[in-house]
């Protein structure tokens, strides 16, 4: 891709700047919220499955310096942009171009403190997106169960897997982790009194703690968007603009 085919977009109030395809899959709030949910500490290792142009990992690096991060991306153009974005943001992100079901031998030999992912949301059937890159990023070609199994295999014992996905897929997400990890679930609602459309699931490999369904995080104020500019709630603005952390473990104990 050449620069006229790209836009350079700001995340976390400009702390992260990322090149993205103008017409392909474009990261928005989901990778930022995903990064905010990861209970990472300096010096830990992080693997992002399906990293796209790297926004989630870069947001994580902006919040917690000193991480050792690896991203896996199957689309060559997006992997190249992730490498460019990492270099321009000064982030220690190694990007591996590979299919989720055919990871390189050296990567299969490693275990990580954290594995994160924003798997494709939409079912294999249905009309394809006009842009091939966008279609590949959004359509579930590899089954969700494979994403979960790969994440669990790459996480160390006691490590964390953090995913963001559609709320309607929560039964499948929990089934994938059943007997293998303990889970906290944070519903994400666009506005108060509306159903949650997305969820963040955080699993601890080998954990035996009880399942916890947390109170929903409401993203926008009011019943509808009424004017120019964002209408984020204070909590959502802190996460999306000020690089705050979600702290799902603390929320579960409150």
Image (cartoon, rainbow, N blue to C red):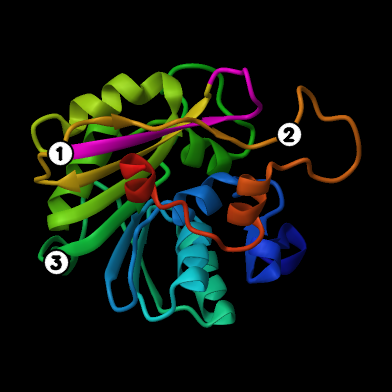
Q: Earlier in the sequence, mark 1 or mark 2?
A: 1
Residue 20 point in image, percent of width and height: 64, 58
**Of circles 3 and 2, which is in front?**
2
- For numbered disc 3, what is the local secondary structure? loop
Residues in magenta, as a range: 182-195
Label 3, residues with CA under 10 Å away: few <14, some 14-19, many ≥20: few
Residue 155 point in image, percent of width and height: 17, 56
- For numbered disc 1, what is the local secondary structure? loop
Q: Which residue is mark 1?
A: 209
Q: Is residue 61 left or right of residue 11?
A: left
Question: What is the number of the mark on residue 110?
Answer: 3
Q: Earlier in the sequence, mark 3 or mark 2?
A: 3
Label 1, residues with CA under 10 Å away: few <14, some 14-19, many ≥20: few
The residue depicted at 18 percent of the width and 56 percent of the height is 159
Residue 226 point in image, percent of width and height: 88, 30
Q: Check whether the beta carbons of the residues at disc 3 and disc 2 lie within 8 A of each other.
A: no
Q: Classify the position of the C terminus by image quarter.
A: top left
């Amino acid at each position: 891709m050449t620069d006229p085919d790209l836009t350079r977009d700001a995340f976390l109030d400009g702390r992260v700047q990322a090149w993205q395809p103008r017409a392909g899959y474009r990261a928005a709030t989901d990778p930022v919220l995903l990064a905010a949910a990861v209970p990472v500490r300096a010096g830990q290792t992080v693997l992002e499955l399906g990293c796209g142009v790297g926004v989630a990992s870069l947001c994580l690096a902006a919040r917690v310096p000193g991480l050792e991060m690896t991203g896996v991306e199957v689309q060559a153009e997006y992997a190249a942009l992730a490498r460019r974005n990492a270099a321009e943001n000064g982030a220690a992100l190694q990007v591996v171009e590979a299919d989720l079901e055919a990871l390189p031998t050296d990567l299969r030999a490693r275990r990580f403190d954290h594995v994160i992912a924003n798997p494709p949301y939409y079912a294999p059937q249905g009309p394809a997106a006009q842009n091939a890159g966008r279609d590949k990023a959004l359509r579930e070609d590899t089954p969700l169960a494979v994403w979960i199994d790969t994440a669990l295999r790459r996480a160390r014992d006691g490590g964390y897997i953090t995913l963001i996905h559609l709320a309607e897929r929560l039964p499948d997400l929990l089934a994938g982790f059943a007997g293998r990890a303990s889970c906290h679930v944070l519903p994400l609602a666009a506005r108060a009194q509306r159903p949650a459309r997305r969820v963040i699931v955080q699993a601890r490999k080998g954990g035996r703690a009880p399942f916890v369904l947390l109170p929903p995080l409401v993203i926008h104020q009011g019943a509808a968007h009424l004017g120019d500019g964002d209408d984020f709630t204070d909590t959502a603005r802190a996460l999306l603009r000020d690089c705050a952390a979600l702290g799902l473990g603390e929320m579960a104990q409150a």
